[in-house]
Image: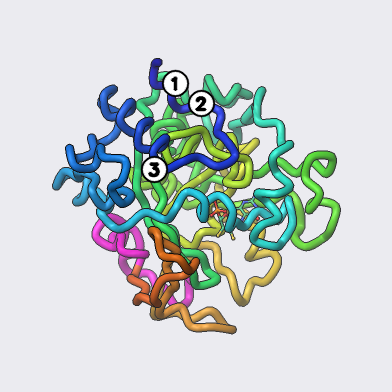
Amino acid sequence: MNLREALRIPSADVTEESVYRDRRRVLAMLGAVPALGIAGCSEAAPPASTATITPEQAKAGFSTAEELTRELDATTYNNFYEFGTNKDDPSNAAKTLRTSPWTVAVGGHCAKPGKLSLEDLIKGLSPQERIYRMRCVEGWSMVIPWLGVPLGDALKRFEPTSKAKYVAFTSLADPRQMPGVRSPVLDWPYREGLRIDEAMNPLTLLATGMYGKTLPQQNGAPLRLVVPWKYGFKGIKSIIAITFVERMPKTSWNMSQASEYGFFSNVNPAVDHPRWSQASERRIAGSASKLFAERIPTLPFNGYAAQVASMYAGMDLKKWF
Ligand code: MTE
């Protein structure tokens, strides 16, 4: 099996941890992900805290030894309003979303715009596994093993010009496939954006998979953004357009409630949501019998300050929340 095949393996509805671990082993053999420690190969071992993480990976923020969120929780406790606003709506309703063929239009201020198949968009880029914390603005968090390519690697090939100060992203909004789009809960399509330096940061991932398999529809198949130092809503799902723009683009949650959701949305325990504190979070992790583990403090930039804080030097993060 080549790596492309490994990344595009159709996902089963619910995958046993052992299957994920097996896939991980395949990827590790191909040199794409850090190999699990020998002990980690035993199927009975707890998830991922046994993963071998090199000091370089830890330093880059590319991986963490924290306990993984169970795959079942990460794929059934979702926000994907195109399929409904309840946490289990996406896993119940998104199964029918057609994710292949899939085309992404890349345009705006760049020398080489184009409409590409997903396969061509990521062709030749080295797939990577990243184990990231994900902190939702609602106050819960997960630790998820993603597969994907660094967004910057994909974007560079379109040769953005000096006018490309921001990157705007658009999700599919197809009322025939996405029942939630028929109700005006957000101004569809779902939109997100990054400043160009944020888009080019090595942590920013265009994800095509998770837990060693192709992304399930409810998690944003076939292509979503993962920006681990920002609140989860920046991680736009089922992307169909990427546009280089000169001005800060409109983003869905900011359009919906500007006083509550800023453009930057960096995880920041010192800036509360107007209706709740952001100082701590409930981690959804591991094999705990209850969904939520104990409350833990939320870290500035979700624990990625060493890698990203310099991008915001001199900015008032209370103003630019
Ligand atoms: N992308 C689209 N298109 N629609 C959405 O409703 N929800 C966001 C984000 N991306 C959302 C989206 C929010 S609020 C969060 S927290 C994450 O997706 C959730 O990702 P997950 O369901 O894979 O955990």
The residue wearing badge 2 is 8
Q: Is residue 12 left or right of residue 203?
A: right
Residue 298 percent location from the top left of the image: 37, 73
* Nearer to us in this view, 38 or 221: 38
User: Which residue is at a point 58% across and 40% down the rendered structure image?
Assistant: 216
Q: Is residue 310 magenta?
A: yes
Q: Is residue 6 left or right of residue 120?
A: left
Report the disc number at residue 4.
1
* Nearer to us in this view, 22 or 63: 22
Mark 2 secondary-structure assignment: loop
Q: Is residue 318 magenta?
A: yes
Q: Quadrant of residue 286?
A: bottom left
Report the disc number at residue 200.
3
Q: Is residue 243 visible?
A: no
Q: Is residue 203 left or right of residue 210?
A: left
Viewer-side label of 3, 1: 1
User: Which residue is at a point 51% across and 55% down the rendered structure image?
Assistant: 73
Q: Which residues are magenta?
A: 301-321
- Sequence-earlier tag: 3 or 1: 1
Report the disc number at residue 301.
none
User: Which residue is at a point 39% across and 45% down the rendered structure image?
Assistant: 145
Going by the numbered disc 3, the residue's amino acid type is: Met
